[in-house]
Structure formats: C-alpha cells, structure tokens
Amino acid sequence: MLTPVKNEMDLSEDIVHEARQFRTLLAGFNRNVELLYENQGVKPQIDSVAMAKAFAKWRQAFDSTRHFAAQNKGDFVVFSAGLMLKELLLAKPLSEQPKAEAALVEQSFSQWPEGYAYASFCLSVAQAVLDRLGEGREINQALADDPAFWNSFRENVAEDASYAIAYFDLLCGVEPNWTGPDVPWFRPAFTKNKKLGKKL
C-alpha cells in the first residue's frame, strides 16, 4: 500500500497545522517506514539528524512560499508535500537497504525502496491534509504500480532533486511543471489562475 499512514494521519484533530511540526512528521515517518518494511525482510535505519535537516530546509521553503496557498489551497498542499519529498531525497534519512527476497517485495517498491518510502510518506500526509480541507484527490495508482516510473524518477532526481516535485505531481494526478518544478509561480494551477483573471 502506497500510503500506509494516511488513516493514522486522518485521526489527528488538526493535521493541517500539525503537519508543519517536526515531531509529528518524524513520528509519522517512523511509522510509515515500519509499516512499509514490516513484511520485506529488512529493517531500515532512520537517521533523525538527517530528518531534522530535511524538515528545517522544507520549513524554510514552505514559509517563503505559503502565500501561494491563497491562490489554490489544494495545489499548494501538493506542492508543499513535493518540496518535502525533495528534501528527504537530498537528506537521505533512510540508509540504503539490502534487497529482500523477491517473493516478499512489490515490484514498484523493489525498484527503489528509499524513494518509494519517502514518496509514500509525503502522499500520506498530503492526502490527509487535503481530506481535512475537503479537497481530497486520487493517487495515480497505475503510475505508482509501474516499476518503470520509479526507475525514471530515480534517474532524474539523481540529476536534479527538484524533479521530485514534478514526479510527485504525477502521482497526485496534477499537471507538473517541468521547467522549474520548485518554482511555485510556474505551476499550471497558478498560471491558469492568472490567465482567468483571478485576483492574486
């Protein structure tokens, strides 16, 4: 399951604000990894210092772009979660794991376990927040289950970590911005608002 902690996040009374707190994200990430790996025959190590570094970088980016939420709250949630994915990929809080027995591992998971774990966590948080805002959306399950998608994702973010945001958009069924994935005002959801003459 790609979003193992979504239901647990949904139980939070104020997930919209709690998702901005390090202790909430760290606990959620630890639980997400536990659930993803419990039947895979390996036990990953989580570097809490690397997690703190990822969170600090994410929070800085979030605070500098949060005014875009006024234009399109749902799209900004997806963008913010994509930013978190980017920072997790850069900070690498999960150590690379030895391969488990093939019979135990989903193909999409086995292509890139760490990347899959980071993406699944960010999707869980994003979906929980979107549900609370009444803007829930479906994951593109066909992509999530496609090993070729994860191979392409891994290859491209190795060259430029900002592509994590565009790949995350694809998983969320959102039109990505490939020109500058981490530039919010390039996002189709925001540029369309401008073309429609909506007040910014």
Image: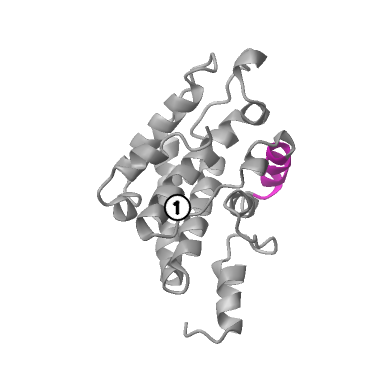
- The residue that disc 1 covers is 58
Residue 142: give x, y in percent of width and height: 66, 42
In the image, 82: left or right of 131? right
Colour mode?
A: one colour
Residue 13: give x, y in percent of width and height: 25, 49
Residue 151: give x, y in percent of width and height: 72, 37
Instruction: Tell me the element at label 1.
Output: helix
What's the residue at 60%, 76% (across, down)? 192
In the image, 6: left or right of 105? left
Which contiguous range is marked in magenta? 149-160
Does residue 2 sit above or below 167 in this rendering? above
What's the residue at 60%, 48% (across, down)? 171
Q: Is residue 150 magenta?
A: yes
Badge 1: few (under 14), some or many (20 or more) residues near its Cα, within 10 Å? many
Q: Is residue 173 magenta?
A: no
Q: Quadrant of residue 46?
A: top left
What's the residue at 67%, 50% (across, down)? 160
Q: How many marks?
A: 1
Dominant secondary structure of the residues highlighted in magenta in the image: helix
Mark 1 residue type: Trp
